Amino acid sequence: MAHIKKRYWISLSILLILFSISLFGWRYWCSFKQEHDLSVDWRGAKISLEGITFDEVTIFQHSKLLITGKNLLVSWSQLSANSLDIHWQENTALSTVEPAEKVMVDTDQNLNLSSMATILYWLPKMIHVDSLRWFNQENELYNLDVDITKQQQAIRLTITTNDHDTIKLATTLTLNQEDSRIDLQDGLLTVALNQADTTNCSLVLPFKGWITNNQLFLTSLEDASFSLDKLNLSQDLLLTNSAGKVKLQVQSKIPFDVKQLSTTAQLTINRVNGIYQTSEIKSASGTSNIVIKNNQFTILIPALTIQEVNVGIAFEKVKLAGTYTASLKMPNKGVVTWTQAKANIFSGSVVLENNKLNLAKLPQQFNVKLKQVQLKDIFAKYPVEGLAANGSIDGYLPVTLLKMKKNNNETDIQTVIKNGQLATNGDGYLQFENSALKNYVKNNPNMKILTDILKNFHYTKLTGKVDYANDIAKLGLNIQGSNLDVENGKAVNLNITLEENIAKLMMSLLLSDQISEPIRKRIEARLK
């Protein structure tokens, strides 16, 4: 009998303890609800050995927060839900109740790790939500699969997106009592994008960091890399067949404020190919550093090499070095500075003189120099019936960037060249004879002597004046020389004026090359 009574007392004691804990928890929950103006409603509640299940639970805070959970299971060891929708109504009204001094003090306080340790202790061993959707102003921002596994003084957090693109973030959050912060360890961010304009685009980013009550710090680890087959960044820019490595460091205030964001990134470009508007970029490699601070970003390029940029004319072995700085609000109105910008063209070279351009304060001007450009290479690449030439040309082109309005009132940048100068470097020759010219002479006998001279014209001087605006280039040439087989080599002075729509010419030259299908479609659309 004594043993039976003892068992009863033990059972009753356990029940009493559980009842006391439940009563205390219920009173705490009621107090918490009242303090934060929360309303809670549920339906379909069931109690079993697995725990308490709810068909639906709703938590509501007036004009600010609405949380709806469906098929919710709550037990000592597990918390799970099929879906959890969080509707957040952002409050834009400014609070003037608390003085600035009070806010400053609260912001500087350390994390209350003892409270977090208590919360961590009472957390279930596993938390899983199949679909956590976050709404802001009724717009769905995120749809996530969330897994949390409790460890010793830490939790393992895994978040995966539930859409066409797969973005997965996994990290271990550990309470760091000594430094009053939460450490992020064994972090790994993986991104795999596959959509209509994106094919096999991936990012693998191992990281570590920490969080305090008012600051977040993240830094990438070794082996962070990216690769892609196709990525359409904008209407004008398409990247293809690219790969490289990434170094990243992020520091931000909490709550997040883009004006106080501090980020540094380094891209080691192993290989980048792409298309900008109707120009093709082949095999770019080098390094690029990106710094975001004080609401602006800076891109530093210590050295970048591009095998070829084809705009209709092929610029080969392009070498670039410089910086670009702009506001995050107006990224296309920054300041570009370059210390190197040169390329090979027709066995010669083109160089942009060192300069600085402020794209927010147009017009701006820079100078382009041509050196040792070979005529024979020009006509070999772009042949004209019956025309051959030999010699080299130097040039000096002052380029001005102007602001231009489109039909939709958007602004664009127009390129203008005034009084550009071309001149030969030494002697050379021109040979021009074709069927069209012969037919022209039959109807204009007076032009026969000119056509005879052009059959083998050796020049001693060739100069030109270049003007360009609204896609139209005007070239005025002055050629001095003679043909030894005509009129005993009498000196001849020729003045020739040429006019061409450069934009259409470049597009037609591109169409004649073996270009990629995306460029062909863009060119055909523009020509239409």
Image: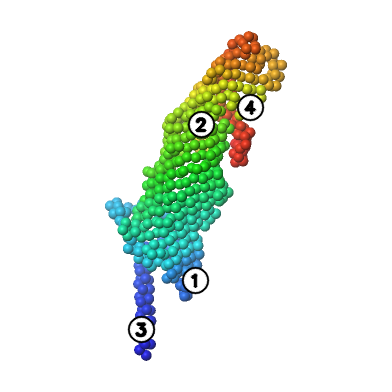
- Residue at image position (38%, 52%) is 216
Q: Secondary structure at mark 2?
A: strand
Q: Which residue, given by chain and number where applicable, does mark 3 sit on?
A: 9
Q: Position of residue 394 (x, y in %)?
A: 51, 23
Foreground mark, 3 or 2, reads 2
Indicate the amino acid at tag 1. Gly
Q: Is residue 393 left or right of residue 123?
A: right
Q: Which residue, given by chain and number where applicable, does mark 1 sit on?
A: 44
Q: Which residue, given by chain and number where applicable, does mark 4 sit on?
A: 383
The numbered mark at residue 343 is 2
- Residue at image position (37%, 67%) is 121
Measured in 3D between alpha carbons, the distance from the residue under mark 4 to the one under mark 1, in whole angstroms, is 82 Å
Whether residue 72 is visible, yes or no, is yes
Mark 4 surroundings: few (<14), some (14-19) or many (≥20) residues within 10 A: few
Earlier residue among tags 2 and 4: 2
Earlier residue among tags 2 and 1: 1
